[in-house]
């Protein structure tokens, strides 16, 4: 079962906060030792030679400056920003998050309220799923820098993950009024999507794409998300075209490959889909590619291979969830293993931390549905619908849960709404939907 919402932190747009605030001059006469982390070699297919050369040169210059003057705040912040961007591009979050935190540590030791260091720390906390801590920093910064777009972006992200959707909307409105750009448009797009306005989300994501530079990773990520939105309203040709553009603008872009693989699955070209997923899997460490591979194996009847891939996904998630903040991802991994009892344990741990988040509630509802516990599934699926989200996969599970809970008429109506316009829905889920609609 592939996760439907890819909003989360690792996937969001990072632009160095230092570009939007003038650093305070602080007298740091005493030098302290600061060890800079080396950039990990990019895989050949992800190198993008010109971009990679510029990145390496910038990192080398900054490292030299820091070595000469460990109290050079501006260079420390700039180097940490490079680490975070590399994490997005390569998927090596564990290494680069540690590198960025280590880099800004000396700043915060001298100046606990340094704006740039705190924004970087909050960004890392978000990627580590420490949402409440990230929100606390965002709110702290907002008292001093309420008209800074990066701060408002932090508030949007943290509040969305915690299920504080009204607060997220307020921050997004303020963010876009201050600076309409790729970061603010992309957040508006996501908020429109989860509030049921997918066409409006596409319009906002178009603005985000237009605001970025073609070929830049941030721009192509937004284009990938826009294509994903097109799939949700059944505009498969538009989706395929945009996935192709991402690959044309940024060769071997992993998310472009993932998108094209999904299109191939919908066209029942499973050999092509498997090849694309496997290619993406060699480029970036990401559970989405592995889930796609497992899905294709199931569709082609290679159940043993599918089980082996599900086990690999679980092992992968265990490796990256050492901090104990990946309970929702662990729940999805155990759903893939069909171990619903363990999946529920992890999902409930996540629920205790953020009970208002709609994706958390949806995941729990799905687990109960898989266990045929429809009364509990109904309670949580209703909570997942509180923002009026029209995601076709969410509506499909809602209709199935309603139908099996005895609300047959309502269930069928919701299922009819889910499949309207022939959106992209996972094959196994669509099979269950058709059984009800054809009954």
Image (cartoon, rainbow, N blue to C red):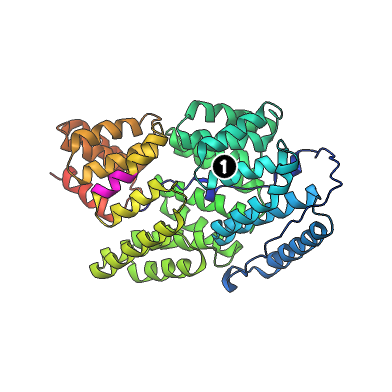
Residue 166 in percent (x, y) is at 50, 26
Does the image show residue 365? Answer: yes
Does residue 203 belong to the magenta stretch? Answer: no
Q: Which image quarter is the C terminus in? A: top left
Image: 293 above or below 402: below
The rendered magenta stretch, by its main secondary structure, is classed as helix
Image: 163 above or below 215: above
Residue, x 48% and y 70% (percent of image)? 282
26 with respect to 238 (left or right): right
Residue, x 60% and y 41% (percent of image)? 122
Splitting the image into 4 quarters, where does residue 392 fall? top left
- Residue range highlighted in magenta: 341-346
Q: Nearer the viewer, residue 4 or 223?
A: 4
Residue, x 37% and y 35% (percent of image)? 352
Neighbour tally class for label 1: few under 14, some 14-19, many 20 plus, Cα within 10 Å: many
Q: Nearer the viewer, residue 313 or 28?
A: 28
Residue 210 in percent (x, y) is at 63, 47
255 with respect to 137 (left or right): left
């Amino acid at each position: 079962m592939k996760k439907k919402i890819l909003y989360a932190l690792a996937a969001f747009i990072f632009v160095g906060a230092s570009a939007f605030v003038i650093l305070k001059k602080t007298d740091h006469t005493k030098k302290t030792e600061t060890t800079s982390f080396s950039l990990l070699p990019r895989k050949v297919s992800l190198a993008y030679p010109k971009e990679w050369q510029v990145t390496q040169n910038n990192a080398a210059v900054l490292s030299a400056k820091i070595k000469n003057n460990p109290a050079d705040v501006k260079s420390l912040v700039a180097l940490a920003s490079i680490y975070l961007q590399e994490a997005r591009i390569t998927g090596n979050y564990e290494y680069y998050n540690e590198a960025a935190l280590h880099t800004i540590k000396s700043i915060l030791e001298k100046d606990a309220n340094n704006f740039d260091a705190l924004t970087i720390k909050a960004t890392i906390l978000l990627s580590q799923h420490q949402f409440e801590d990230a929100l606390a920093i965002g709110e702290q910064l907002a008292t001093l820098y309420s008209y800074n777009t990066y701060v408002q972006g932090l508030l949007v992200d943290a509040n969305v993950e915690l299920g504080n959707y009204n607060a997220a909307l307020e921050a997004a409105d303020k963010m876009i009024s201050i600076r309409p750009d790729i970061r603010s448009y992309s957040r508006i797009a996501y908020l429109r999507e989860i509030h049921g306005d997918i066409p409006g989300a596409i319009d906002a994501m178009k603005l985000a794409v237009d605001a970025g530079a073609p070929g830049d990773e941030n721009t192509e990520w937004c284009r990938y998300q826009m294509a994903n939105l097109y799939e949700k309203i059944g505009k498969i040709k538009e989706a395929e075209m945009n996935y192709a553009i991402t690959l044309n603008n940024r060769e071997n872009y992993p998310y472009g490959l993932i998108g094209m693989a999904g299109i191939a699955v919908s066209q029942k070209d499973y050999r092509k889909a498997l090849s694309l997923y496997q290619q993406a899997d060699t480029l970036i460490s990401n559970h989405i590619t592995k889930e796609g591979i497992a899905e294709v194996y199931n569709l082609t009847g290679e159940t043993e291979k599918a089980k082996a891939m599900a086990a690999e996904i679980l092992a992968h998630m265990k490796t990256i969830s050492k901090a104990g903040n990946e309970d929702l991802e662990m729940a999805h991994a155990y759903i893939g293993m069909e171990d619903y009892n363990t999946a529920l344990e992890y999902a409930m741990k996540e629920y205790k931390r953020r009970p208002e988040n709609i994706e958390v509630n949806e995941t729990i509802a799905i687990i109960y549905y898989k266990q045929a516990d429809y009364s509990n599934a109904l309670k949580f699926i209703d909570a997942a619908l509180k923002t009026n989200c029209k995601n076709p996969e969410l509506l499909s599970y809602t209709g199935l849960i309603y139908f099996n809970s005895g609300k047959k008429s309502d269930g069928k109506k919701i299922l009819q709404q889910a499949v309207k316009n022939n959106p992209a829905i996972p094959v196994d889920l669509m099979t269950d939907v058709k059984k009800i609609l054809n009954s």
